[in-house]
Amino acid sequence: MKKEIPEYAFKYLVKTPQDGTIPKSFSENASQKVLRFHRQLPDYQPTNLVRLSKLAQSWGIGEVLVKDESTRFNLGAFKVLGGSYAVARLLCQKLRVNIEDIDYGYLLSDEVRQRIGQITLTTATDGNHGRGIAWAAEQLKQRAVIYMPKGSVRSRVENIRSHGAAVEVTDLNYDDAVRLCCRMAQENGWYVIQDTAWEGYTEIPLWIMQGYMTMCAEAVSQMSQEGIRPTHVFVQAGVGALAGAMVGYLVNKFQENPPRFIIMEPNNAACILASAAAGDGLPHAVTGDLNTIMVGLACGEPNPIAWDILRDFPSCYISCDNFVAANGIRILANPLEGDDVVEAGESGSVGIGLLDLLANNPDFGKLKQELKIGPNSNLLFFNTEGATDPENYREILWHGKYPSAVI
């Protein structure tokens, strides 16, 4: 007997994309400049685009493809792409040089240290972004101070500290930790490297978003080599920086016929959905503890740069319960015979968990039909992190933590 899905488990809004202004900051030319930088970093290589052919066949879908960021620079997440690019751009700004005119090795040189000394970078993070900033500071011989919200798990804290950063776990939620970080930076003369924006602080968040384009540029190239073009792109949102960058890049790449974009968030932190549902074209915050297992998405205030993109181009905004992410973890870790295993953390797995419902649960048949998902659809997902909380990952797999609401 099928369990009834709780009414609170999902909220969604389907709409016709608007004819928004194509964001020039995420053009093909801009993405190639970013990619040139990342290719110079130690141990750079494109992450895998996992083609789940057996799953797609079983669920009656053309293609299911997962861009797997769990192996990016051996850091377990995509965030380092934005952090490393933004830190390098900041150093170049202080040196008064263009990043495309120098080699990465120059930023490591004694000449650079003599010219600008050692600066302190700071950010607030749920884990992955902070580790990316700490890694970039370590590589570039700078200092990092990282603030984390209450409830941050030890593994994520220790991962950041392993790169030499100072870490303070606060008793605040994510958005208040950002405010603390900014106050401490102002008092101490530090540089905030934050992946959200506000009035007077837009340049560095834009650099971070541009850094994320490497992930999508790689995926599009890998799909092209297989003769595949995405018809649907599922992308998760916290403040919206990742989602805005992916949508921004893809509407530039496929201007004549962009894919449908589905934006996914946790129930308790669905600020992009709340902004879209308000209908006034403005970003709206959600408040509270923002409690979710998808801690990388536990953000209550939209990035206004991202919102300008996410307001216009997506076809659907949906908030999901914890069990959706947990189901995604289990599905990716236990694939059908012939498909590859994907290690996905809670924030990386929500898309596949949602697709399971769209493909297999009749309660989601109307939404699936509205999104025009079927045998001719090529669906792209982003596994944005690996098992960055190993204990929770094991509990989900071994003991069925956060069981499905659907049987």
Image: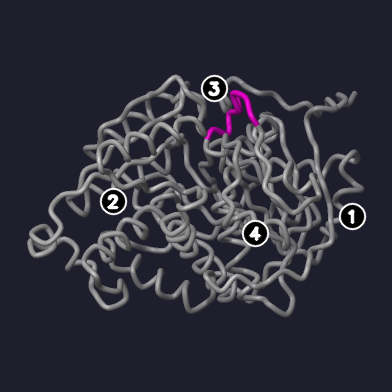
Instruction: First in sequence, mark 4 or 2: give its number.
Output: 2
Picture disc at residue 136: 2
Answer with left or right where residue 145 lies relative to residue 288.
left
Task: Look at mark 4 in the image and give the residue it sits on.
Answer: 308
Which of marks 4 and 1 precedes in the sequence? 4
- The residue that appears at 55% across and 48% down in the rendered structure is 383
| Left or right placement of residue 304 versus residue 117 in this view | right
**Residue drawn at the location 51% of the way across and 42% of the way down:** 343
- The residue type indicated by label 4 comes to Asp
Residue 369 bears which disc, if any? 1
Q: CA distance from mark 4 to mark 2?
A: 28 Å
**Residue found 62% across the figure and 24% down from its top:** 288
SS of the residue at dot 3? helix
Q: Dot 4 lies on which element?
A: helix
Give the left or right position of residue 67, taking residue 378 as reference. left
**Residue type at the position of mark 3:** Glu
As drawn, 119 above or below 185: below
Q: Position of residue 210 (x, y in %)?
A: 47, 63
Q: Amino acid at mark 1?
A: Gln
Q: Which residue is mark 3?
A: 395
Identify the magenta region.
287-295
Q: For marks 4 and 2, give the one nearer the viewer.
A: 4
* First in sequence: mark 3 vs mark 4: 4
